[in-house]
């Protein structure tokens, strides 16, 4: 197959890159033998490609390595903080559970086991706190606004003990708040044992 | 072991808690990343700042590096994006590496510089001619011919389709060829 200059020139780069088929490469080379213009084009392209291998490797300043390693170490230290927060949250949750267990055992009125579990759940999953609150309200036979009022009242007492471990360990206030509110509601519910068996069955 | 395997071994050591492997990775890739950024940004100070940013980002995100692929192309992708961020921060409204008219003022590259070029091709002349190309052509050319990356690897580094990379390489080489011709190469004696 013969090729002319218009067909040959767009393929010169492919020839230099070695990505032409054997057949196409042979046809192009055959054209180059007889065409000085295309030979010149190919030589210039080859020079451009080879020329880039002449580019010197440049080096940053002598202090570069130390700066990068120090900055990378600082970035790693910053990344440790979220892990610390998770650890602190776990510790705070454990402390809160212990507090809740103690209150369940000794407080009057007593906090039920399910009330204590609600506190733990709300602490670990604050986004679910409202649905837990709603569930506890239904269980206590209260409307949600009534439940919130009762919970706020009970939480006022509860918060004195609940916020201490949380604030010391740096737990997010919202999580303490949710846990406290749920615990308060659980206490309020325990103070009003008006369980409707039908409602309890529905909840289960 | 080749460089690729050395890199993977270093990453494994870092993941296992050996911080000394950071210095090893840095020493192996520092100069090539800096050279790439210097030719892209034009200023040694900017190149050093962006290279530092790139290494720190890469080292902090090693969790996202897929060991099945070459570390160096992942590192260059991080460097490319760090350069983009830098240019956007410096000239937010105007500049992009994809803008054919958005070339930073790099080196003296006007017609006078070309006319003054010596007859013999050397690194300094190529440096000047390369700097005169728009960044969108210069960047794939550097990755192909100084870092010896393949088309698919360049496409991954630049987050571009392979076809676009091929077109940019073609046009970039063609522009470089024309500049060489304007410098007197390819004449009778050529």
Image: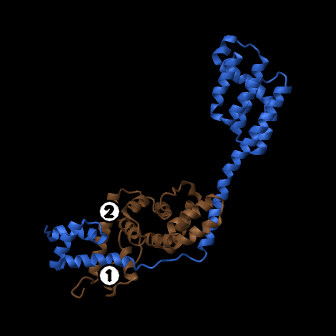
Task: Give the quadrant of residue A18.
Answer: bottom left
**Residue A9 at what x, y percent from top left?**
21, 70
**Residue B104 at what x, y percent from top left?**
41, 69
Q: SS at mark 2?
A: helix
Q: Residue at x 49, y 77 (%)?
A: A58
Evaluate whether residue B109 shows in this view. Answer: no
Between residue A122 and residue A4, name the one nearer to us.
A4
Between residue A22 and residue A150, name the one nearer to us.
A22
Query: Which quarter of the rendering shows the C terminus of chain A?
Result: top right
* Residue picked out by circle 1: B114
Q: Chain of mark 1?
A: B
Question: Relative to B140, is B69 on the left or the right?
Answer: right
The circle drawn on residue B166 is: 2
The crowding category of the residue bearing disc 1, from other C-alpha atoms within 10 Å (few below 14, some 14 to 19, many at least 20), is some
Q: Residue at x 14, y 70 (%)?
A: A4
Q: Which chain is brown?
A: B
Question: Relative to A58, is A30 on the left or the right?
Answer: left
Label 2 vs 1, first from the N-terminus: 1
Shade of chain A as shown in the rendered figure: blue
């Amino acid at each position: 197959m013969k090729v002319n200059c218009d067909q040959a020139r767009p393929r010169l780069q492919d020839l230099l890159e070695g990505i032409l088929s054997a057949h196409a490469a042979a046809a192009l080379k055959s054209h180059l033998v007889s065409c000085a213009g295309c030979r010149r084009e190919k030589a210039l392209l080859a020079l451009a490609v080879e020329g880039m291998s002449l580019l010197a490797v440049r080096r940053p300043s002598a202090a570069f390595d130390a700066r990068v390693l120090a900055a990378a170490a600082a970035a790693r230290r910053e990344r440790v903080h979220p892990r610390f927060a998770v650890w602190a949250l776990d510790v705070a949750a454990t402390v809160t559970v212990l507090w809740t267990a103690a209150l369940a055992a000794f407080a009057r009125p007593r906090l039920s086991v399910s009330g204590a579990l609600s506190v733990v759940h709300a602490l670990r999953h604050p986004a679910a706190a409202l649905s837990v609150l709603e569930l506890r309200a239904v269980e206590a036979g209260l409307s949600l606004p009534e439940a919130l009022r009762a919970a706020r009242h009970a939480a006022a007492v509860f918060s004195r003990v609940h916020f201490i471990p949380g604030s010391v360990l740096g737990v997010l206030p919202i999580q303490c708040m949710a846990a406290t509110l749920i615990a308060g509601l659980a206490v309020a519910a325990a103070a009003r044992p008006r369980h409707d068996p039908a409602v309890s069955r529905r909840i289960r | 072991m080749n460089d690729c395997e050395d890199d993977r071994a270093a990453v494994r050591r870092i993941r296992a808690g050996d911080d000394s492997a950071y210095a090893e990775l840095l020493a192996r890739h520092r100069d090539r990343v800096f050279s790439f950024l210097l030719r892209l940004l034009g200023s040694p100070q900017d190149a050093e700042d962006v290279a530092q940013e790139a290494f720190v980002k890469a080292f902090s995100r090693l969790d996202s590096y897929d060991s099945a692929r070459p570390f160096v192309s992942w590192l260059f992708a991080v460097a490319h994006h760090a350069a983009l961020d830098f240019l956007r921060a410096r000239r937010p409204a105007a500049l992009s590496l994809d803008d054919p008219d958005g070339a930073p003022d790099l080196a003296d590259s006007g017609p006078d510089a070309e006319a003054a070029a010596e007859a013999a091709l050397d690194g300094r002349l190529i440096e000047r001619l390369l700097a005169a190309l728009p960044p969108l052509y210069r960047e794939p050319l550097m990755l192909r011919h100084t870092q010896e990356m393949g088309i698919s690897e360049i496409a991954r580094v630049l987050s571009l389709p392979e076809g676009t990379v091929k077109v940019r390489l073609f046009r970039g080489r063609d522009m470089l060829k024309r500049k060489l011709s304007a410098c007197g190469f390819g004449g009778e004696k050529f």
